[in-house]
Amino acid sequence: MTDLEPAAAAATPPRPQEWAWATVGAPIGPLGIAATPRGLLQVIFRAGAEETEAAVAGLTRRMGTGPASGPCAAREILDLASAELAAYFAGHRETFSVPLDWSLISGFNRRVLRELAAGVPYGTAVSYQDLADRVGERGAARAVGVAMGSNPLPVVVPCHRVIESNGGLGGFGGGLEIKRALLSLEGVLPEPLF
């Protein structure tokens, strides 16, 4: 083995993985969604041209290829996710059945997000500290906040349902106006007056 072999191995591009991308309309603004044949991979807020270009470029690097343009298994996942998101925003769906591809997240963050997805239902909220306690990490409220900020699947994995222990909204990667809108949709907060 020469000194060049480890560097060459590190520079090897990822094995191409099938994935697809779509932009869907929502009352909170356009959402960019990506999927693999395993499940929904990513959701981004405010999916305008610039945000979409950046997200697709990042996923292209990560997945080793660009998004599929024709019919494929990943596109079927996108179709299901689009339909479920539309029903959610119309007030006709409280849970998501679309499979999730957790490959963009790992470790503590994945544990926290899986607990959030499974254990914090529509119309409820949980504090950062309560969520830390649920995954056996007492005192890790700030780390839970970091996990929420790294959530690649917002709305579907409902990080908007995580609030401060004192009832404050806390932060939100999509912006507090979107967090308020999602919590209002679910009846956790009253509808804004204007």
Image (spheres, helix red, strand yellow):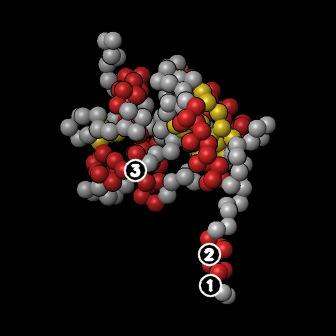
Identify which residue is drawn at 33% across, 16% down. Answer: 192
Q: Earlier in the sequence, mark 2 or mark 3?
A: 2
Q: Quadrant of residue 172?
A: top left
Q: For mark 1, what is the residue?
A: 3
Give the residue type at disc 2: Ala
CA gap between label 3 and label 1 equals: 37 Å
Mark identifier at residue 147: 3
Check the image and report above or below for 94 versus 163.
above
Residue 180 placement (x, y as % from top left): 35, 26
Determine whether label 3 and label 1 are within 8 Å by CB. no
Residue 68 placement (x, y as % from top left): 74, 42
Mark identifier at residue 192: none
Check the image and report above or below for 190 versus 99.
above
Left/right placement of residue 165 relative to residue 21 reads left
Left/right placement of residue 19 relative to residue 151 reads right
Give the residue type at disc 1: Asp
CA gap between label 2 and label 1 equals: 8 Å
Q: Nearer the viewer, residue 178 or 166?
A: 178
Q: Earlier in the sequence, mark 3 or mark 1?
A: 1
Q: Residues within 10 Å of mark 1 (few under 14, many from 20)?
A: few
Mark identifier at residue 7: 2
Q: Quadrant of residue 14?
A: bottom right
Q: Nearer the viewer, mark 2 or mark 3?
A: 2
Q: Nearer the viewer, residue 94 or 10?
A: 10
Number of callouts in the render? Answer: 3
Check the image and report above or below for 92 versus 166.
above
Q: Residues within 10 Å of mark 3 (few under 14, many from 20)?
A: many
Residue 191 placement (x, y as % from top left): 34, 17
Identify which residue is drawn at 57% across, 54% down. Answer: 103
Identify which residue is drawn at 40% across, 45% down. Answer: 149
Kind of element beneath mark 1: loop
Answer yes or no: is residue 152 visible.
yes
